[in-house]
């Protein structure tokens, strides 16, 4: 994707030169080839380090809420990120006029763990060309197919193209197939109750309460999270079953109608806990019941922040 | 004295030990490895190039541990202290074992002794597994340890093609392996070669000489906000760290238990005061605390760096922050500060 | 004293129009039922429901006002959206949805709350103790107190 990177760089360079923005949130190269980092560009000289490839695994919208509202922010957004930004605009976390969204149609984020599984831990170089990914492991080049390495949530992606971006770099990609995620959820729903609970239990009990899922999520921006409350205390703070289950249930539920299925939570988890099966269920219900998808525009409030008298038919008396 | 353990006898040997000891060894859980009690059906994960993802400090300082149960109505309580009888931790990496010796200076001093920690330490035999091929994310040699460091271990194993060559390092270790066949000269030579190759394969990741002074000097500078700008403020680095030991004691009022949980300086509520004031209000101050504790404050107490270079924080940081890169920039930053000043 | 099935009743303080009914709920609720009185069903956070479940409740009743009858105009409409989905969600991970019942009360519904609670109690008794979702119970063996 070298052309895209050049285009991105030129775009950011112009933004910074024109002083149209105070900071541009993007990715930069790091020492480890598989771990590009979120970066904050304020000078053109720093753009030497700019990186954009399939390994940029974080949701950059996460950093938006750290800035005062009058900061002019440029942000590189892929499909899910742009929707997260929109959802944050709806929730009045940053004014639209102080944002410049540089949209990049996304071919999907690669799962580092899938790469390491196929090769080994110590990868010394990485490059990608279209559908081909090549890594250097112990001095040998290994070629891999991009489609085999996509993160699970990207395999189910419906909207790869940025929504509401100010500029779009590269050609728009075809929309994803919404039946894939629906089928996955329906398959889970079709399991019997005990199996569903057993799965949930198995995933939740590995939790170490590091809250990486929370911190990696752009929509988790509360100053004080419910698990941090001391009076009243809502959940147990140890790694007991009741504590970790409560965390997983409520964390996911707080995302209802706000989650954009970016999968940043799952990628951040150090214990490989599956989480998107929870939020995907909520997203599916939001779509079916309220015809709502989070972040598809920057003014429709999520279903739980609004009400409708038509709902009265649903009151079972 | 050096002994050998033939690889194909490994499971049998561990089972034999299981009769007398609780045997704990690294095992596969999903896609990662973790120390778990050994059973007949265990799938060992000894051949990974690096240490387990979940740190073995949890075997001595469990993430959550009930310390007492109480009854508010009767105004009485029971102290709970569940300690292992006799235990072998098999296949612990040298970095994790040396981290335990660092933690001894916190939990087991002349002044204060933590009975939970001390009890577990006393009843445990640590059989280490040296790292023949340390991954590039490890940096034990940089902080004064090594892939075959002996600190804290009762015995250390070196993996050859079909055998583990074991060097007993303490009376406990000598006793455990005394009836094992002795290693041949050839074995010992291969071990020497592997050990020196492993060590030579590792680079100096950052300069430790004068690092403390540099960091102390930078205390009030912008360095911290710069390196921590992309930090999420989660607890991955500290919870997986073998030398982080902060804990928080909580009363779980609904179940009448007092629990000691791991805590981390990377959380906002760690330093939040009852008044609402937080002396470490942003992620940069918290990052400063984490780095300064390891590379400056530990030196004030025991003249050793509080990091054993296990590389977990580097490997598992969700935003790919690399503590080695952070520390490398420290010295650059200092020269900039000085030049401007 | 009856202890099972344990039922938590979340009641909007405006929903019971008749004074005798409210009196009954306030003073004569069976000992196995636990009353949580709230200003509106809209005040019920899903966390409250989860807390009741984890605290050992076998069933939960939420009683509130009909649409357009909410004292705060829209509280119950917002509550319905959230709780309905929350129960779907709990059902998705294995918790039986039938353990939670909504009772939306109208002006003429005198004496209905008693009937609903009795009916719900017998239904929950049939279901027995919930098998899914961990309750807050002791995590460590030993100790004679507590």
Image (tube, coloured by chain):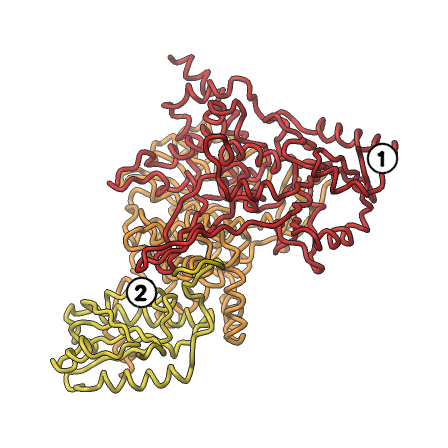
Chain colours: A orange, B red, C yellow
Q: In the picture provided, is A28 more to the left or to the right than B160?
A: left
Place residue C38 in its image quadrant: bottom left
What numbered label is drawn on residue C24?
none
Q: Secondary structure at mark 1?
A: helix
| Residue A279 location (% of width, % of height) | 44, 62
Residue, disc 1? B187
The quarter of the rendered structure image containing the N terminus of chain A is top right
Q: Relative to B33, does residue C122 appear above or below in the rendering? A: below
Residue C51, position as x, y percentages in the image: 35, 64
Say which of A315 and A74 sits in front. Answer: A315
Q: Secondary structure at mark 2?
A: helix
Residue at horizontal 18%, vertical 76%? C27
Task: Pick the residue in front: A3 or C141.
Answer: C141
Residue A56 picture location, percent across and down? 52, 44
**Which residue is painted at 43% across and 63% down in the image?**
C137
Q: Which residue is mark 2?
A: C48
Front: mark 2 or 1: 1
Residue B76 location, quadrant: bottom left
**Does C73 sit above or below residue A175?**
below
**Measured along the vertical axis of the image, is residue B220 above or below residue C78?**
above
């Amino acid at each position: 994707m070298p052309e895209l990177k050049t285009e991105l760089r030129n775009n950011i360079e112009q933004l910074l030169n024109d002083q149209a923005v105070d900071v541009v949130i993007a990715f930069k190269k790091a020492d480890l080839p598989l771990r590009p980092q979120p970066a904050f560009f304020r000078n053109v000289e720093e753009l030497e380090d700019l990186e954009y490839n399939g390994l940029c695994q974080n949701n950059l919208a996460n950093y938006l809420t750290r800035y005062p509202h009058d900061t002019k922010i440029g942000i590189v957004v892929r499909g899910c990120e742009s929707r997260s930004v929109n959802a944050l605009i709806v929730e009045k976390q940053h004014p639209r006029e102080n944002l410049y969204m540089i949209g990049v149609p996304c071919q999907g984020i690669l799962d580092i763990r899938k790469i390491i599984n196929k090769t080994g831990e110590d990868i010394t170089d990485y490059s990608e060309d279209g559908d081909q990914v090549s890594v250097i492991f112990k001095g040998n080049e290994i070629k891999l197919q991009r489609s085999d390495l996509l993160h699970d949530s990207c395999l189910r992606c419906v909207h790869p193209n940025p929504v509401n971006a100010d500029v779009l770099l590269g050609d728009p990609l075809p929309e994803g197939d919404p039946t894939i995620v629906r089928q996955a959820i329906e398959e889970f729903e079709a399991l019997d109750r005990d199996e569903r609970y057993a799965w949930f239990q198995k995933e939740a009990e590995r939790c170490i309460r590091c809250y990486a899922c929370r911190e990696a999520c752009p929509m988790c921006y509360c100053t004080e999270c419910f698990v941090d409350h001391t009076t009243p205390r809502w959940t147990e703070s140890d790694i007991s079953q009741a504590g970790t289950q409560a965390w997983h249930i409520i964390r996911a539920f707080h995302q209802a109608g706000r989650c954009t299925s970016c999968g940043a939570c799952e990628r951040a988890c150090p214990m490989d806990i599956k989480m998107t099966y929870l939020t995907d269920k909520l997203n599916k219900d939001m779509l079916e019941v309220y015809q709502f998808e989070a972040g598809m525009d920057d003014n429709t409030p999520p279903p739980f922040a609004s009400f409708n008298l038509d709902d009265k038919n649903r009151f079972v008396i | 004295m050096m002994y050998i353990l033939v690889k194909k006898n490994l499971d049998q040997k561990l089972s034999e030990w299981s009769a007398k000891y609780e045997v704990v060894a690294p095992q596969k859980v999903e896609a990662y490895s973790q120390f778990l009690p050994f059973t007949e059906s265990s799938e060992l994960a000894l051949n990974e190039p690096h240490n387990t993802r979940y740190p073995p400090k949890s075997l001595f300082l469990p993430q959550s541990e009930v310390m007492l149960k109480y009854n508010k109505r009767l105004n009485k309580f029971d102290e709970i202290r569940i300690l292992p009888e006799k235990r072998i931790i098999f296949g612990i990496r040298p970095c994790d074992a040396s981290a335990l010796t660092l933690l001894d200076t916190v939990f087991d001093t002349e002044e204060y002794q933590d009975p939970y920690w001390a009890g577990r330490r006393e009843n445990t035999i640590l059989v280490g597994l040296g790292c023949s091929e340390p991954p590039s994310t490890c940096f034990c040699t940089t902080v004064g340890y090594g892939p075959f460091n002996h600190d804290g271990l009762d015995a250390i194993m070196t993996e050859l093609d079909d055998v583990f060559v074991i060097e007993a390092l303490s009376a406990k270790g000598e006793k455990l392996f005394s009836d094992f066949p002795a290693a041949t000269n050839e074995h010992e030579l291969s071990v020497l070669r592997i050990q020196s190759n492993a060590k030579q394969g590792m680079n100096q990741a950052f300069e430790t000489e004068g690092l403390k002074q540099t960091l102390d000097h930078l205390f009030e500078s912008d360095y911290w906000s710069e390196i921590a700008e992309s930090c999420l403020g989660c607890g991955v680095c500290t919870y997986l760290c073998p030398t982080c030991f902060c804990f928080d004691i909580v009363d779980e009022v609904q179940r009448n238990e007092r629990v000691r949980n791991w805590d981390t300086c990377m959380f906002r509520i760690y330093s939040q005061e009852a008044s609402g004031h937080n002396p470490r209000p942003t992620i940069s101050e918290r990052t400063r605390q984490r780095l300064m504790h390891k590379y400056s404050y530990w030196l004030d107490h025991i003249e050793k760096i509080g990091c054993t270079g296990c590389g977990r924080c580097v490997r598992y940081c969700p935003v790919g922050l690399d503590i080695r890169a952070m520390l490398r920039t420290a010295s650059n930053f200092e020269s900039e500060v000085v030049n401007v000043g | 004293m009856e202890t099972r099935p344990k039922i938590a009743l979340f009641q909007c303080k405006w929903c019971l129009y008749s004074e005798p009914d409210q009196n009954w709920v306030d003073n004569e609720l069976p000992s196995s039922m636990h009353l949580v009185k709230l200003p509106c069903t809209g005040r019920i956070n899903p966390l409250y429901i989860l807390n009741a479940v984890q605290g050992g409740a076998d069933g939960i009743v939420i009683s509130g006002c009909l649409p357009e009858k909410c004292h705060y105009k829209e509280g119950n409409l917002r509550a319905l959206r959230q709780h309905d989905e929350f129960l779907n969600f709990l059902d998705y991970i294995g918790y039986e949805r039938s353990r939670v019942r909504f009772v939306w009360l109208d002006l003429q519904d005198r004496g209905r709350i008693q009937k609903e609670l009795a009916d719900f109690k017998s239904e929950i008794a049939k279901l027995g103790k919930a098998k899914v979702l961990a309750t807050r119970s002791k995590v460590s063996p030993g100790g004679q107190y507590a």
